[in-house]
Amino acid sequence: MGQKQTETVQSFLMKVMNGLGTGTVIVVLPTGLFGQLFQALQQQYPIMQQFYTATQMVSSLMGMVSGVIIGLLFGFSSLEAVSVGLAVIFAGGAVQLRDGVIAMQGMGDIIVMAITASIAVVLVKLVSHRLKAYQLLLLPSIILFVAGGIGALMYPTVSQLTTAIGSAIQYMLNLQPFVMAMLIAAAFALLIISPITSAGVALTIGITGLGAGIAAVGISAAGIGLALAGRRVNPIGTSIALIIGSPKLALANFLRKPLMFLPMLLSAAVSGLVGLYLNVQGNSMSAGFGLSGLLGPITHLNLSPTGWSLDQLLVTFIAFFVVPSVSNWVFLYLCRDVWHLVTDEDYRIQPVG
């Protein structure tokens, strides 16, 4: 009986995490696929500015998108799923009131979203069927104000975790260069697959220059590694989404078996050392996104003294693609085929919908 209850709790949490991971990728992909293109074209074609704005807007809707997906994973009706989405986006922190104006910025705090979504799901299960004819009238408000309100009250406290992690990473930046490179790359690789927002940490500490470039390389190693590890069990579209979307798509896999991320973590450390040697540059945004929207490579090229020269294009290709790919191949072989620490099934992304 106890085992059955444990499995039920685990299933509940996995649905929440699968919804958050899928929601992250959905809102990141428009920016990942078209954001840089629209930004480059908007000077020549003004209409592209509207499309570029759309790619930036959707990331702030992550709470809504993830909440709806979570509701659907629990078999909720459209009304119930949207009610969960409303609570999550309200509590997540991406939409805030500033000087009397509602502003959207960033993706929000994923831990707060997870807590709010969990509360919202339980609340829907408890009250939805009891409302009967008044469901449409009352359910969205109840879930928004109760679940969303609890999450919003928790937001200032929970978001301090991001600040604390940022302080730890800030300390890493002052270490000996080789140690710094390995730790920063590995830390951001771990952040991008964890419930913590890597972009939030990067923006909190204002990481720039070489440290930001190394962070972006670490995230690249995470995405490429997860794509390579799951190539036998996942569709090609999922693999692409892990690289140019977000490795957070594998969040539920990571929480189920953290050891599955060991090859990517080791690859990130190696990639960080190479990034140090190649003097990869970045800023707070590229540090938190890596290959998403090709932001890491493009930012390095824009910040490089020689710009988009042939030598810097080669440096970028080596740092962001070649080294992460080769090192992941090596560590995957060791962890899966030699040490038998992971299996192909550890990397299977459960489809949603």
Image (spheres, helix red, strand yellow):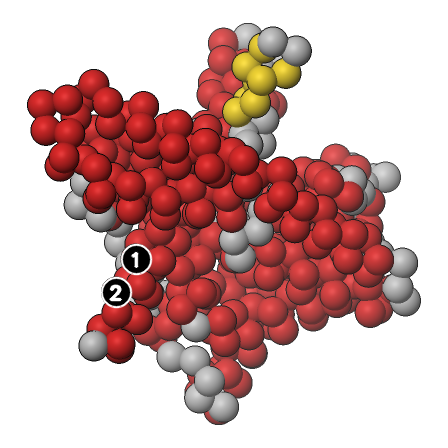
Q: Quadrant of the N terminus?
A: bottom left
- Picture disc at residue 8: 2
Query: At 56% across and 22% down in the image, what residue appears?
Result: 96
Q: Residue 213 appears at what percent x and percent y?
A: 74, 50
- Compared across the picture, whether 5 is left or right of 18 comes to left
Indicate the secondary structure of the residue bearing disc 2. Answer: helix
| Viewer-proximal residue among 228 and 83 | 83
Q: What type is the residue that disc 2 sits on?
A: Thr
Q: Residue 84 appears at what percent x and percent y?
A: 32, 35
Q: Which residue is mark 1?
A: 12
Specify few, some or many for label 1: CA neighbours under 10 Å numbering under 14, 14-19, or 20 or more: some
Spot the residue most to the left: 133
> Residue 177, can we see it?
yes
- Compared across the picture, whether 113 is left or right of 320 comes to left
Q: Is residue 219 above or below residue 8?
A: above
Query: At 55% across and 41% down in the image, what residue appears?
Result: 154
Q: Is residue 94 above or below residue 337?
A: above
- Tags 1 and 2 touching, CB below 8 Å: yes
